[in-house]
Image (spheres, grey):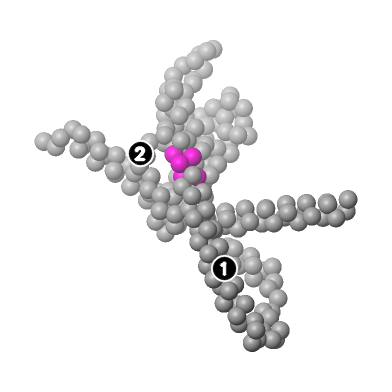
Amino acid sequence: MTNIIIQIENANDETRNAIKEKCHEIAETCKAYAMNKKEMKNDDFRNHLEKNDNEMFLYLYDEIGAKNKPVMSRHKLNISSGMVAIGNNSGMFVSAHDDDCNDFYYESRTESFSKYKSEMNKIEKALDTYSLSFFTSSETETDETETDETETDETETDETLPEKTTLEQIYDVVEKLKLSDRVELRDFLNETIEAEQKELKQANG
């Protein structure tokens, strides 16, 4: 008979693998759950879940509270919070669990949605660390490229200037970027816009 520890850990491995394999479906389910929970009051949300997803309702609302109303136990509240955290960051969740998207080398070791509120914070930190290292690496590559371009400019004329890039072309490129690169691009644009707005404000007195 297999050792009980090994049995439990094998079951945990199977659960983690299932989360990876079904990460897109999980993200969509949690996104809808989080949206409804945000837009509805507690009673309305409970009634909505009971009517539209009775299986989830019966699973989450496992205790009876005040006024004889179904309520979530502490464990089920943690599961609900984990689903909301995933739903509010569904793209980041998929990026961390889909091997085709996981470009920042994060390996989740969580096998329960009750732990995903804190797990999403870890994923976000891992993504921030990756983005920072990617940005630093890009700066180094850019410095080297600029040096080469400076040497080239001495022999080239203005006829080598690139053609104007259209917004449509930029959109096409952005859509093909990985999540971490889009996050970095967003931060860059925000910083650039803020800097230009500040300059305009100073210029206009």
Tag 2: Cα neighbours inside 10 Å, few (<14), some, or many (≥20)? Answer: some
At 55% from the left edge and 63% from the top edge, which residue is drawn?
139
The residue identified by callout 2 is: 111
Residue 73 location (% of width, % of height): 44, 22
Label 2 vs 1, first from the N-terminus: 2
* Name of the residue lying farthest toward the right: 205
Vertical placement of 130 versus 69: above or below?
A: below
At 47% from the left edge and 23% from the top edge, which residue is drawn?
72
* Alpha carbon separation for disc pair 2 and 1: 43 Å
Does 69 sit left or right of 160 as displayed?
Answer: left
Which residue type does callout 2 highlight?
Answer: Glu
Residue 80 location (% of width, % of height): 48, 32
Which residue type does callout 1 highlight?
Answer: Asp
* Name of the residue lying farthest toward the left: 1
Looking at the rendered structure, the secondary structure element under dot 1 is helix
Instruction: Pick whichever, 35 or 180, lies toward us.
Output: 180
Residue 84 location (% of width, % of height): 52, 36
Magenta includes 120?
yes
Vertical placement of 85 versus 199: above or below?
A: above
Q: Which residues are magenta?
A: 119-124
Residue 164 location, quadrant = bottom right
The residue identified by callout 1 is: 143
At 20% from the left edge and 34% from the top edge, which residue is drawn?
5
* Name of the residue lying farthest toward the top: 67
Magenta includes 125?
no
Closer to the camera: disc 2 or disc 1? 1
At 58% from the left edge and 74% from the top edge, which residue is drawn?
147
Does 47 sit left or right of 76 as displayed?
Answer: right
